[in-house]
Amino acid sequence: MTTTRRLLAALMAGAALAWAGPAAAQPFPTQGITMVIPFGAGGPTDIVGRMLADAMGRDLGHPVVVQNVGGGGGTIGVTRVVQARNDGHTILYTNIGLATQPTLYRRLAYNPVTDLEPFGLVTATPMVISVRPNFPGRTLADFVAYAREKRDGVNLANVGLGSASQLCGTLLQAALGINFTTVAFTGSGGVFPDLMAGRLDVYCDQTTSSLPFVREGRIRGVAMTTATRLPQAPDIPTAAEAGMPGVEVAIWHGMYAPRGTPGPVLARLNAALRVAIQDQAVVARLNDLASPPEPLDRVTPEAHRAHLAAEIERWRPILQAAGQFAD
């Protein structure tokens, strides 16, 4: 073969590879995946997210590495994912706060419904209303009596507007008709030491982070935000049992990819998520923390998208009535 013919053959081979396009691409994923959690390390969303990241990574054949991007009530981390490449290698794991941001942030830089691709609900976690261990009383009724006497002298912690703790605290104050003194933290990892030391009066957080401390006696759980008592904590009554049926909320969690992520990539991520929430070790740990995985028929992009839209509308009037906005 002459030099000219060899050069022509090489050019034709290169053109063929170029035109092969997606058909020649490697199957997703081609590298490690970053899971952005828009809250601090050690918090309730982070605890579950790390379990899922490990299990998903085993199924995907590439590590799923958690990146905590806190601040702005979760909006900074969400923005990071919205602006990421839509190739599936950056995903978001977050909670109900995504549904409250369009109301709390009147100049929000993204639309959760149109700027993200939901690919599966994960859990719906109850909340524990907890008080300091040296609180003068052991029941929610004791706390209610104390709150009515002290009113704004009660210190209530939360980890930012739109956080699970803020939503639960809003419901609690509305049920009592009292505005507590709010102490803001950047993450629940900073709240618990102050609650244990008696520098805070009350905190409402997810079972995934609260129950271990309640079981150790380091804080005192006085109520659950569930319709019935939990088998994982049968001694803690529901808020409704203390005459506050409006204080009932579960903090749901889900996973997302940037808008425009290809359908086959979303399908692969969804498949890995479904494997993760059926992993025996993950299921056992979530059940122990009173945060069991969602039924598989809710771990779909379609069910997740519908749920997100419905939750935005559900929380809008509640938050508007509270009159607290982040901007």
Image (tube, rainbow, N blue to C red):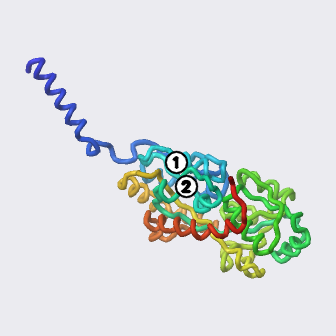
The dot on residue 150 is none
Q: Quadrant of the N terminus?
A: top left
Query: Image height check: is 286 above or below 40?
Result: below
Measuring from the top left, give residue 186's x and y in whole percent: 72, 50
Q: CA distance from mark 1 to mark 2?
A: 10 Å
Measuring from the top left, give residue 5's x and y in whole percent: 10, 22
Q: Residue furthest left?
A: 1
Between residues 85 and 128, which one lies in front from this camera angle?
A: 85
- Residue indicated by mark 2: 93
Of callouts 1 and 2, the N-terminal one: 1
Q: Is residue 182 left or right of residue 69?
A: right
Measuring from the top left, give residue 52's x and y in whole percent: 53, 56
The amino acid type, in three-letter code, at marker 1 is Val
Between residues 304 and 68, which one lies in front from this camera angle?
A: 304
Residue at 66 percent of width and 48 percent of height: 71
Measuring from the top left, give residue 320's x and y in whole percent: 67, 66
- Residue indicated by mark 1: 81
Structural crowding at the residue carrying mark 2, measured as other residues with C-alpha within 10 Å and reported as few (<14), some (14–19) or many (≥20):
many
Q: Is residue 290 visible?
A: no
Query: Image height check: is 22 above or below 113?
Result: above
Structural crowding at the residue carrying mark 1, measured as other residues with C-alpha within 10 Å and reported as few (<14), some (14–19) or many (≥20):
many
Quarter of the view holding residue 156: bottom right
- Disc 1, SS: helix
Q: Residue furthest front?
A: 107
The amino acid type, in three-letter code, at marker 2 is Tyr
Q: Is residue 128 left or right of residue 278?
A: right
Quarter of the view holding residue 104: bottom right
